[in-house]
Image (spheres, rainbow, N blue to C red):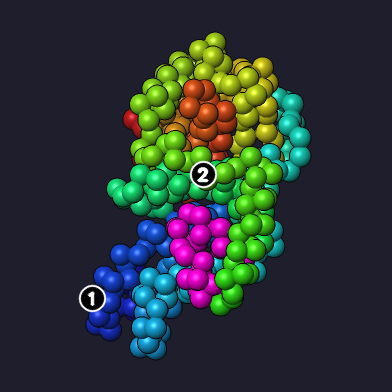
């Protein structure tokens, strides 16, 4: 059967109203699948498969639950299938061992892209304007550290936490969705909360940032960081970092901790970044930008997608994803700057 650009069957076989009904859930389903899987492209694939399965089986949908609940059930099954077929969970370099020294050899260890937490554009996973507390939780729950922590949870705990804590579903509805008991849901949530607490992660603190938009202080911090980075002013850039800040660069296993080592790296191994240009984007509810390095043939070429983590006053983490050929189109970034 012919396929449309959206992946659903061709127009002559499809009910446009049904397509519209399914498509309006794409963003929230992508957010759910991204939190479950930790990969932006895996999440998009999972949602596409969800909508395709829903279209094919809609004739058997009896309306015992809402269309939204039915789609989440399908999406959950798709995610569990993908998790079950995966050989290893996605993670961040900081989960592999201690920090590296800022030397060339630290780039020797490299893992496949499917092993790393991937960044995702805010507009693919975060809801539009709504309740400030809900939008704050949504933003916190796609931070890189939180998504990485989710991947350490067993699949059922992961689903329960996202459905209960992020999407605010009642325990009974989650139990029905996962075909289990309310007691089992509450137990899974308690265990998941305990794991996140051990990692000093708590969605309840999100209410202090009641918006999906960066604050004025955050925007200023990004502007100052980009200005310092493009001028390659390491004194100014270092002043914007918290003393225990970390820097990592997937797919390399290398990660650095502390202003001194980050500065040493920037002035040594990473000195090829001198002269870069940066284009701000929105990623993982955090400050982010696309980095372009000078092109010997003129202009600047894509080099990495950087996500900055902050504590509100200083930068606590720099993660530069070295997959521009995949990530720049996802974020709507140009393939060259002239």
Which comes before the other along the chain, label 2 or label 1? Answer: 1
Residue drawn 56% across the image and 16% down it: 238
Question: Label 2, label 1: how many angstroms apart (C-alpha)?
Answer: 38 Å
Q: Residues within 10 Å of mark 1 (few under 14, many from 20)?
A: few
Residue 161 figure quarter: bottom right
Q: Which residue is rendered at x = 60% and y = 42% of the image?
A: 201
- Secondary structure beneath dot 2 equals helix
Quadrant of the image for the C terminus? top left
Residue 105 at x, y percent in the picture:
75, 31
Is residue 175 located in the magenta-colored stretch of the structure? yes
**Could you tell whether 275 is left or right of 215 in the image?**
right
Q: Which residue is rendered at x = 44% and y = 66% of the image?
A: 47
Instruction: Tell me the magenta residue range.
Output: 156-178
Q: Which mark is residue 295?
A: none
Q: Position of residue 317 (x, y in %)?
A: 57, 31
Quick check: can you spot residue 195?
A: yes
Magenta stretch secondary structure, dominant: helix
Q: Which residue is mark 1?
A: 17
């Amino acid at each position: 059967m012919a396929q449309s650009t959206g992946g659903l069957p061709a127009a002559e076989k499809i009910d446009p109203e049904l397509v519209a009904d399914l498509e309006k859930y794409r963003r929230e389903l992508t957010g759910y699948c991204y939190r479950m899987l930790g990969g932006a492209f895996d999440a998009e694939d999972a949602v596409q498969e969800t909508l395709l399965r829903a279209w094919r089986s809609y004739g058997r949908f009896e309306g015992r639950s809402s269309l939204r609940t039915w789609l989440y059930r399908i999406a959950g099954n798709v995610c569990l299938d993908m998790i079950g077929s995966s050989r290893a969970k996605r993670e961040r370099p900081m989960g592999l061992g201690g920090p590296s020294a800022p030397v060339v050899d630290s780039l020797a260890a490299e893992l496949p892209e499917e092993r790393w937490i991937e960044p995702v554009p805010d507009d693919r996973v975060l809801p539009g304007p709504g309740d400030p507390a809900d939008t704050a939780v949504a933003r916190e729950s796609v931070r890189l550290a939180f998504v990485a922590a989710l991947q350490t949870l067993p699949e059922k705990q992961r689903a329960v936490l996202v459905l209960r804590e992020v999407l605010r579903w009642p325990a009974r509805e989650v139990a029905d969705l996962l075909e289990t008991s309310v007691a089992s849901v509450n137990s899974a949530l308690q265990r998941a909360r305990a794991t996140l607490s051990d990692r000093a992660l708590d969605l309840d603190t999100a209410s202090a940032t009641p918006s999906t938009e960066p604050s004025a202080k955050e925007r200023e911090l990004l502007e100052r960081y980009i200005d310092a980075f493009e001028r390659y002013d390491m004194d100014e850039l270092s002043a914007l970092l918290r003393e225990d800040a970390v820097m990592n660069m997937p797919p390399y296993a290398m990660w650095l901790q502390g202003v001194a080592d980050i500065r040493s790296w920037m002035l040594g191994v990473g000195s090829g970044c001198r002269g870069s240009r940066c284009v701000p984007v929105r990623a993982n509810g955090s400050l982010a930008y696309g980095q372009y390095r000078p092109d010997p043939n003129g202009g600047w070429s894509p080099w990495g997608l950087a996500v900055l983590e902050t504590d509100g006053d200083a930068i606590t983490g720099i993660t530069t994803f070295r997959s521009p050929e995949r990530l720049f189109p996802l974020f709507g970034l140009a393939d060259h700057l002239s």
